Image: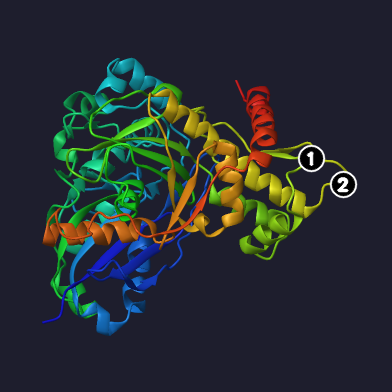
Amino acid sequence: MKESLYLGIDLGTSGVKAVIVDVNDIVLADTNPPLQIQRPKPLHSEQNPDGWMIAVDEAMRRLPANLREDIGAMGLAGQMHGAVLLGEDNEILRPAILWNDGRSHDQCQTLESAVPRLAEITGNRAMPGFTAPKLLWVRENEPEIFPKIAKVLLPKDWLRFKLSRAMVSDMSDAAGTLWLDTGKRSWSEEMLQATGLTRSHMPDLAESPDQTGILSADLASRWDIAQVPIAAGGGDNAAGAVGSGVARPGDTMLSIGTSGVIFHVDDQYRPNPAGGVHTFCHALPGLWHQMSVMLSAASAVDWVAKTIGFSDTPALFAAAEQRGLLTESEIFLPYLSGERTPHNDPHATGAFFGLTHDTDPAALAQAALEGVAFAYADGAEAIAACGNEIEQLNVIGGGSRSLYWGRILASAIGKPLVYRKGADRGAAFGAARLARIMIEGMDAPGVLTAPEIVETIAPDPELTEPLAKKHQIFKDLYKDTRKG
């Protein structure tokens, strides 16, 4: 008898990644159709949910048919904080407002004034990226839409609804809405009331390995797959942590994706929102995590590559590595979408500083890699300020492919980076693991094992001191250029 395979789908910001994994954690197939972001106004960031489903359909059709037929369960992961607003007939009322949307800054202040206990309840400060302020913005700016809202779903949970008709969220993703009592792992009546909503507007809640319905007969037939059970799954970072074996108190992960995250696991709910640190539920029962978030990580490097004329991002990496030197005076602020940790500033902007006649594209490439590394270092400092000891960082995400950048990151942060087999598989792989836990249980052999280490990069003593000096200039530049 054949052993079942497991499907993981990660609804990202720039693409939908799907992987098929066997019981030995071997990825047998993967695909990643792209997605586009719409920015209709300054600070706005939106996507059409129907485009997500089109990309999922494309991803499924790309996976080999002989593997699809052996899938025994599936799990979901996805970009956090997005607001999908549904009417009474489950129609989409407006484009989804995404995690990197900065329009609701004023509404954050309104929420914190209305609920003085907000940080205690949710484990976080109100920030424009979270879901609850977005709904206040809709209520104040789109009064024709707000009364029609029957359900608010997070991106991956809307996808679950399309796959199975189930309206369910998991604890890790729900914790990013500001509607969850994160310590109690349940919806907060106080937070819902502050945004003019009730529990009826929310999906049901489940732990990430729990079953949340089965794939519809229509889609099963379309994709030549059985009507498999669907695990609740997790927010992208929590699912990515499960995939990389970051599953025990004290484990720490560094994620290099569109955004940049440092993720530290805890077995207690210990909120400390000072410095823009988030406290969320982990994608495993009984665990929480503290997390720093920078809004533009690999996406900032991609932007630099495109803007200064490299053929693609790998060409930028190659130019920086061939140059092989820290920049002389060039410094890059990567705040292209504002910033969360540590600034909580949706109006922060990106910039190059210290340009001279000698500055060439390779120097700008190097400055981009250093600037993003400095922003990660800010996040590591914020995590440490919460009383957490970071011993090493397990690296995941597409940006993990560059070991040259890893040397800069390790030296800027001052901690070793550990690269594991399949580090670029990220949240989709974690979603597949959660599906396996749903079927086989938490004690299944190897289900939470960290993948094999393929490289460890320690801080380089020759880089640590000069990067530390430039990091201080980086911090001062933000202070000198911030608005308001």
Q: Nearer the viewer, residue 408 or 457?
A: 457
* Label 1: how many Cα within 10 Å (few below 14, some 14–19, many 20+): some
Callout 1, which amino acid? Glu
In this figure, what is the number of numbered marks? Answer: 2
* Label 2: how many Cα within 10 Å (few below 14, some 14–19, many 20+): few
Residue depth check, mark 1 versus mark 2: number of the one nearer the observer? 1
Q: Residue at x 66, y 46 (%)?
A: 368
On residue 358, the disc is 2
Place of residue 232 in the rendered image (x, y in percent of width and height, measured from the top left) = 19, 53
Place of residue 21 in the rendered image (x, y in percent of width and height, measured from the top left) = 28, 69
On residue 328, the disc is 1
Q: Do the CB atoms of the residues marked 1 and 2 lie less than 8 Å apart?
A: yes
Place of residue 125 in the rendered image (x, y in percent of width and height, measured from the top left) = 37, 25
Question: Does label 1 or label 2 sit earlier along the sequence?
Answer: 1
Q: Is residue 415 left or right of residue 89?
A: right
Q: Nearer the viewer, residue 106 or 455?
A: 455
